Amino acid sequence: MKTKQRGSGWSIALVFNLYKLFGYKFIYFLMYPVSFFYFIFATNVKKALKDYYKTINIKFTNRIYFKHLRFFAICMVDRFISKVDVKSYTFNYDDITKMTEILNRGTILLCSHFGGWAASTNASHVNNKLNIVMQEVLLEEIKKIEDSLPVKENINIIDLNKGTIRVSVEIANALMNNEIVAIMGDRASNKKAEIAIDFFKRKANFNKNPFEIAYKTDKPILIYFIILTGIQEYKIEHTIIYLDKTKEQEDAINLALSTYIQKYEEVIKKYPEQWFNFYNFWENK
């Protein structure tokens, strides 16, 4: 699944310049009029969110819609600003000791399009190499800005556009070296990787690749949700999955997937406005 990045190069550049002049709180409150702009004009997003809120059984109102857009705007801003000033952010972990132990000996980090997943990659608290598997179609202007920003030395992007074979080799090499491989669980890059599963009692497609990789390499999966809780403040909730190698691969994957889905539903019920899949997630499943 490819999705075009929302926003524009000039708007991101403007935010950076204003941030340098006036600081973060100015940018934080600036997101109110920015969110209002999308509130008026982003009709496709509104349509997708109507279906989302109906599915999770929450009444969709203009107030909720605006709040949802504002959360997205803040997380988008944090994605970029955290690259240049990560020390101004606070990330509260539910069990940092256990997470550090798992991450330092190599694991599959299962992320989702939820909350501040992008900002969190700039605040890695371990020295182990973090390989991010992604295929995000950035607008050219935004990509130029992001490429110009500093990247931590222990972060490597595995670009899905390189092709299946090359990507598979890079992932295998990373895990053999006991490095971290971060993969999105709620969006597959191709149809072969999709698996339909009940999600809030409706069929939706998820990415089975990280579960297949975990089974074949005997690596744990660290399910990772980054939740915006305040100004430049996030909390991290996690669940660790060890795939049962005594079971057949399909059975073990389905069991692990059900754990991921259960955790995802739990987090969404508590923080519904931080879901950032702005398309019809349940369409034609």
Image: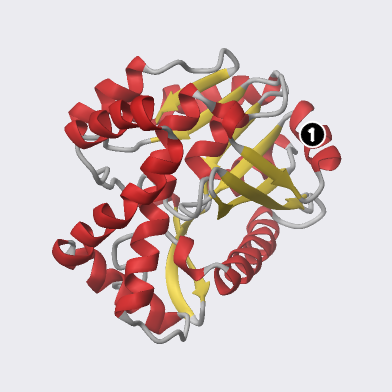
Q: Residue furthest left?
A: 41
As drawn, 139 above or below 76:
above
Seen at 61% across and 19% down, the residue is 173
Q: Position of residue 204 (x, y in %)?
A: 43, 69
Seen at 39% across and 67% down, the residue is 67
Q: Position of residue 164 (x, y in %)?
A: 40, 31
Residue 26 picture quarter: top left
Tell which of 47 and 249 is nearer to you.
47
Q: How is the image coloured?
A: secondary structure
Seen at 32% across and 28% down, the residue is 16
As drawn, 229 above or below 170:
below
Q: Position of residue 179 (x, y in %)?
A: 68, 24
Indicate left or right for 160 with 195 as reference: left
Indicate left or right for 129 with 185 as reference: right
Res. 171 visible in picture: yes
Residue 180 picture quarter: top right
Res. 277 visible in picture: no
Q: Residues within 10 Å of mark 1 (few under 14, many from 20)?
A: some
Quarter of the image that includes the C terminus: bottom left
Tell which of 278 and 120 is nearer to you.
120
Tell which of 37 and 9 is nearer to you.
37
| Amino acid type, mark 1 | Thr
Residue 35 picture quarter: bottom left
Give the total number of marks visible in the rendering.
1
Q: Position of residue 112 (x, y in %)?
A: 51, 51
Element type where label 1 sits in the image:
helix
As drawn, 192 above or below 64:
above
Pointer 1 residue = 100
Q: Residue furthest front?
A: 22
